[in-house]
Each structure stands twice: as C-alpha cells, then as structure tokens.
Image: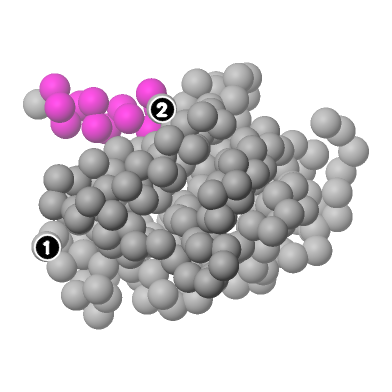
Amino acid sequence: MMHRILLLLLPLLLCACTQHNALMVYPGIMPAELCYLDEAVPGIKVDLKYCGSDNFVGRPIQGYTTGKRAILRKDAANALRTVQNELRKRGFGLLIWDAYRPYRALLDFHAWSKTGDDHTRARFYPNITKRRIYEEQYIGLTSEHCWGIAVDATLVDLRTGKELDMGGRHDFLDTSSATEYPGLTPRQQANRKLLRDTMAAAGMRNYSKEWWHYYKSPPGICHRYDFPLHDSLKPTSGK
C-alpha cells in the first residue's frame, strides 16, 4: 500500500517547484519563460510523436495538430544545451520526442483510455490493459510536460543520423522500459546509462519507469500551460 501511495505522489515529489493550478493559455503568444528548443539548442533533432500517429493512441493528440516545434522552459532548454554539447564530443546528439505538452493532451489521453479502441496495444502496451496504464503510472492526470520542464529523449549517432539501440521504443508501456531494466544487452544498458549520466550532470532527472523521460526541477512557481503548439508564436517581454 505504501508503495502505491508513493507512486501516486511521485509527480508532486519529483518537481521542486510550486505548482500554479490555474491553466495558463496564451493564444498566439510565447510565454516569456518558454522558448523554442531548436533556437536554444542548435543542432538538436526533434520528432514530436504526438503530432502524428506513431504513439500509443495511434493518432495526432489534441494540442499537437497546429505545430511541430518543441517548446520548453528556458532553464530546462539551457540544461539540454549543456547535454547536447557534451554528447557532441562523443559523436552523439539528442533526439526529442516530446517537450512541453498542452494540458488538453492529458485530457485527450484520459478520454481515449475510456474507449474500446485497442488497435495500438500490440505495439505499445501488449502486457497490460488500458485501465492499468494509469494504475501503473505510465500516464497521469498531471505531468511535468505540462509545466514545460520535461522532455522525452533518446540518443542519435551524429555520423549516421541513426538512433542508438536503447532496448525499446518511445512510450512502450512495459516494465522493460524502466531505465535499469535487467533484461537489456550490455550495449543497451550502456546507451541508457550514457543518456542518464549526461542528463544528470546537467541537472536533468530521470523518471525511473521510463528511460526516455527527463525533467528539470526549477525553483519557484511552475505554471500549467494549455496553449496548443504553434510554429510561429510571438515572443513576450520578460525574462
């Protein structure tokens, strides 16, 4: 029972910032504390999975249909710039699968979980039911992504452009996606460790059940945003 309670509290314990529960919606405007990741981290690769159908729902997600550029808080983006620079010394780089996530996307996930649509189960959650996706904390009703402080990421070989073998795909909702899953090959273990160690050195923490999920815990208030992605948001003045 205590283990389950800790899992339910995990999203709150992981983030050192104070949540601001009011949804922050900025139609056509980039909040001053956020930025486009490709501008903050030159050379970073982005393939936002929820913009298309290669995800556990099997279709574009609400909030992702109007843009394909990743957005992140500036402090988290600065940390990723450090990560990218360190990886480049070894011939590797980051590929980002998700960053800021509009809150409406979480509502879309939850609505999907109540339907009978199971056509992606074989590829993304073959060993659990849709109900257990929430019980096992693979998806929640809140997320660091909505605060703009989290990314889903993997490694790529800068010479070939190919992804490194991490022992599993993005959003494979299974115990094998745990960062330290014991059934990996030595190469897969080394690749996950390289990503985790380089992220940790820059202040990005890992969610242990998902090898791809990393977040930055800034001080102060984290706003929960709900503006849809757009590739040409106008900047606001501020920090």
User: With 158 as the anchor, is 115 left or right in this view?
Assistant: left
Q: Position of residue 65 (x, y in %)?
A: 60, 72
Q: Is residue 5 magenta?
A: yes
For the residue pair 201 and 27, the one nearer the viewer reads as 201
Res 166 label: none
Disc 2 residue crowd, few under 14, some 14–19, many 20+, Cα 10 Å: some
Q: Which residue is mark 1?
A: 127
User: With 188 as the anchor, is 55 left or right in this view?
Assistant: right
Magenta stretch, overall SS: helix
Q: Which residues are magenta?
A: 2-13
Q: Which residue is mark 2?
A: 14
Indicate the quadrant where residue 91 lies: bottom right
Q: Is residue 183 above or below residue 238?
A: below
- Look at 25% across and 80% down and name the residue there: 119
Q: Earlier in the sequence, mark 2 or mark 1?
A: 2
Which amino acid, mark 1?
Asn
Disc 1 residue crowd, few under 14, some 14–19, many 20+, Cα 10 Å: few
For the residue pair 185 and 33, the one nearer the viewer reads as 185
Which amino acid, mark 2?
Leu
- Which structural element holds mark 1? loop
Q: Position of residue 117 (x, y in %)?
A: 25, 76
Task: Give the position of the N terminus as an image quadrant.
Answer: top left
> In 3D space, how far apart are the residues under numbered discs 2 and 1 (Cα atoms)?
27 Å
